[in-house]
Image (spheres, helix red, strand yellow):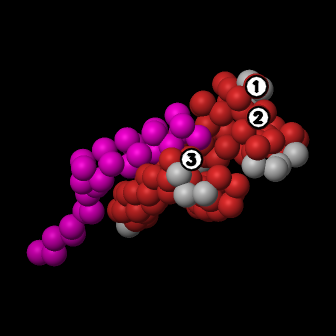
């Protein structure tokens, strides 16, 4: 008699995925979506030397990327692009802050979010690999 092992998702992997992904969604999609038109957001973009239209473009793609990560029915390939986009955003934000202001708290925050993104990506890969069989 042959026994087939059915792969299971560890509860900790699921929990790590959802906690890290929800944190990303709140910080990188909800907050920018609610505050993109504030004076602070406008000044922040201008301070780094970017044109104002970039603030709107960046917010649009952050909201789309966050939704792609948080909605379970979105295909994995789209999620991969969202992860890539956020990684590019965090690395670019780090470089921009270091060049304009030097290495300070503003420069460290994108690196922290990059770590959260990597944790979300690794845990997504773990749980989606199990579902793929």
Tell me where residue 109 appears, x and y as whole percent: 51, 48
The span picked out in magenta is 1-28
Q: Is residue 57 left or right of residue 35?
A: right
Q: CA distance from mark 2 to mark 1?
A: 6 Å
Q: Which mark is residue 39?
A: 1
Assign the C terminus to one quadrant of the image.
Answer: bottom left
Q: Is residue 15 left or right of residue 3?
A: right
Determine if the magenta segment contains residue 29. no
Residue occupying the far bottom of the picture: 2
Q: Residues within 10 Å of mark 1 (few under 14, many from 20)?
A: few
Q: Secondary structure at mark 3?
A: helix
Q: Residues within 10 Å of mark 3 (few under 14, many from 20)?
A: some
Asked if residue 88 can be seen in this view, the reply is no
Q: Residue at x 88, y 41 (%)?
A: 53
Question: Based on the displayed image, in which of its 4 quarters is residue 47 positioned?
Answer: top right
Assign the N terminus to one quadrant of the image.
Answer: bottom left
Tell me where residue 25 appears, x and y as whole percent: 54, 39
Find out whether the residues at labels 2 and 1 contact each other: C-beta distance under 8 Å.
yes
Q: Is residue 12 left or right of residue 55?
A: left
Query: Of marks 2 and 3, which one's residue comes earlier in the chain?
Result: 2
Q: Residue at x 76, y 25 (%)?
A: 39
Residue hosting label 2: 43
Magenta stretch, main secondary structure, is helix
Residue hosting label 3: 106
Tell which of 46 and 65 is nearer to you. 46
């Amino acid at each position: 008699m042959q026994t087939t092992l059915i792969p299971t998702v560890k509860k900790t992997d699921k929990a790590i995925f959802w906690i890290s992904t929800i944190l990303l969604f709140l910080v990188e999609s909800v907050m920018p979506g609610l505050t993109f038109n504030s004076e602070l957001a406008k000044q922040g973009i201008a301070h780094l030397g970017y044109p104002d239209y970039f603030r709107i473009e960046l917010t649009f793609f952050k909201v789309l990327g966050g939704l792609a990560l948080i909605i379970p029915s979105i295909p994995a390939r789209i999620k991969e692009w969202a992860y890539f986009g956020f990684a590019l955003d965090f690395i670019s934000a780090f470089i921009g802050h270091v060049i304009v202001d030097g290495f300070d708290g503003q420069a460290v925050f994108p690196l922290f979010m990059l770590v959260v993104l990597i944790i979300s990506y690794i845990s997504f890969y773990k749980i989606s690999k199990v579902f793929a069989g």
